[in-house]
Amino acid sequence: MADVNTGVFSLEGKGLKLTTPEDIKEYVQQIRDFENLTEIVLSGNTIGSEAAKELASVLPEKTQLQVANFSDIFTGRLREDVKESVKVLCDSLIDLPHLRVLNLSDNAFGPVGAESMFDFLSKNDSLEELYLNNNGLGIQGGKTIAKAFVERHERHEAQGKDSTLKVIVMGRNRLENGSSKELAHMLSKLKSLTSFRVPQNGIRPEGIETLMKGLALNENLAHLDLQDNTFTSSGSKALADALPNWKNLEILNVSDSLLGPEGGMLVADALRENKQLKKLHLQYNEIENDGAEALSEVLCHLPDLEVLELNGNRFRHDSHVVEKIKVALSDKKNDDILGSLSDMEELTSDEEEEEEEDEEEEEEESVPVIVETIEIDSVKEIPEPAKPADNLMEVEPDSEKTTEAAPVEPAKSESVPKTETETKPPVPETKDIQESSAADTTSTANLSVNPDYDNNARRKSAAEELDDDISSLINSMKSQLNI
């Protein structure tokens, strides 16, 4: 419970339910009697507001206290009860001159908890590390924390003091894009962070870009954890632009962040400036061969690399690029740098076939357009040919009617025109001859083309017959006129 050699008082994991002042009185007395107390750990118990007030009464006396671990101490408590407990405990720490670390992780107090911490965060002068993991802060809670630290910085600046804040951890808090502007402003003011960890916060590319503008100014950054947010190519570019500013970066975790093929290449290529890098986590980011290739070329610039995680990306575990990565890592101190590649997300055969089919379809679609254009241009340049003789039956000038011929039907034996040797019928009257000529012409025009039939021979017989008919008509007219 109390270790005088280490200066630690701990009730960690005891599962105590401390609701009233009487419930906690025994432990408060032990803390009071503990000289040179440097660390207090109360995690894994549940403390009510009345018990919290009793505990807060002794903490201002512990001027050597450096670490206050109050994580997971409000399980089963009502929100208003938690709000009051956080307020009294944090206020009791404001004037402690050596307090460096405050941990309130795993307490589901939401935005109201951030409000309860505001006075402590803005007024304490010694705090270096704040741990608020899994508190349900939300967008408003993130804004409140940022505002408190900006006020603290401005007060220090007015007093000619440098910022002491070095570590901010706010994972799993649904900070989202809505708080990114205020957090970026805070980061741009502080410029003193060595560790910034905000994994699993639903921050999307626009929010990532905003955060990077402020984070890039913290040139001593050694640990950056943005795991399980969403980067895509635009967020990846913002990270790649910021990476050269962090010469002391040792740990980079952007796993599960959807860097994508392009983003993977951008981030990998930018790492050549981070020569202090020891741990690189890039799992499940849809990085493809090109990104892995870029990484293999950068590894020679990272002499201190100890951990490289690439599992769950989109290239084969036995591909040539993995061999190149292994070769690049072979000269490192540690032989087991590359993590497991047992869950690589390869392109499926269906996806590969679809890509090939799409490319083929695009090629096929482009061909007819070219051919059609050539044909149209060719038609425009060639003069219109004369109509085929077998598609048009012309009538002699003496005929009163001219009929455009339709396709000629295959000739039948009974419809073959009569020759000169055949007996001609009695010569009709003029009117009848004219009608007969027109009828013959129309009948001939309605025949369709027979490719095996001699069209030239047939057209000659029809003309001869018409000449005979006209000659007979003329002779008949002369006879009637007694010429």
Image (spheres, helix red, strand yellow):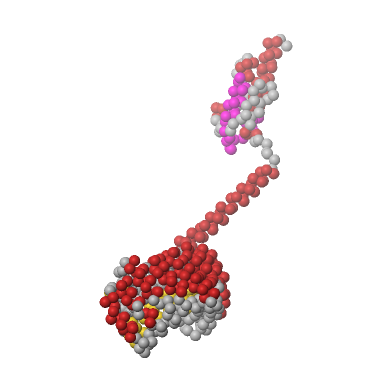
- Magenta stretch bounds: 435-460
Does the segment drawn in magenta span residue 458? Answer: yes
380 or 332, nearer to the observer:
332
Q: Residue furthest right?
A: 483
Name the residue: 69% across, 24% down: 397
Quarter of the image with the C terminus is top right
| Residue 422 at x, y percent in the picture | 61, 23
* Residue drawn 43% across the image and 70% down it: 118
Q: Position of residue 108 (x, y in %)?
A: 36, 68
Q: Nearer the viewer, residue 165 or 225?
A: 165
Could one spot residue 221 in this view of the protein?
A: no
Q: Does residue 196 appear left or right of residue 49 in this picture?
A: right
Question: Does the magenta stretch mainly form a helix, a strand or a loop?
Answer: helix
Where residue 394 appears, as percent x and y from the top left, is 66, 28
Whether 117 is drawn above or below 356: the answer is: below
Indicate the quadrant containing the N terminus: top left, top right, bottom left or bottom right. bottom left
* Closest to the observer, 113 or 289: 113
Can you name the residue that lies furthest to the bottom here? Answer: 5
Residue pictured at 48% horizontal, 72% vertical: 149
Q: Residue at x 30, y 74 (%)?
A: 51
Q: Quadrant of residue 50?
A: bottom left
Question: Percent x, y for residue 28?
Answer: 31, 80
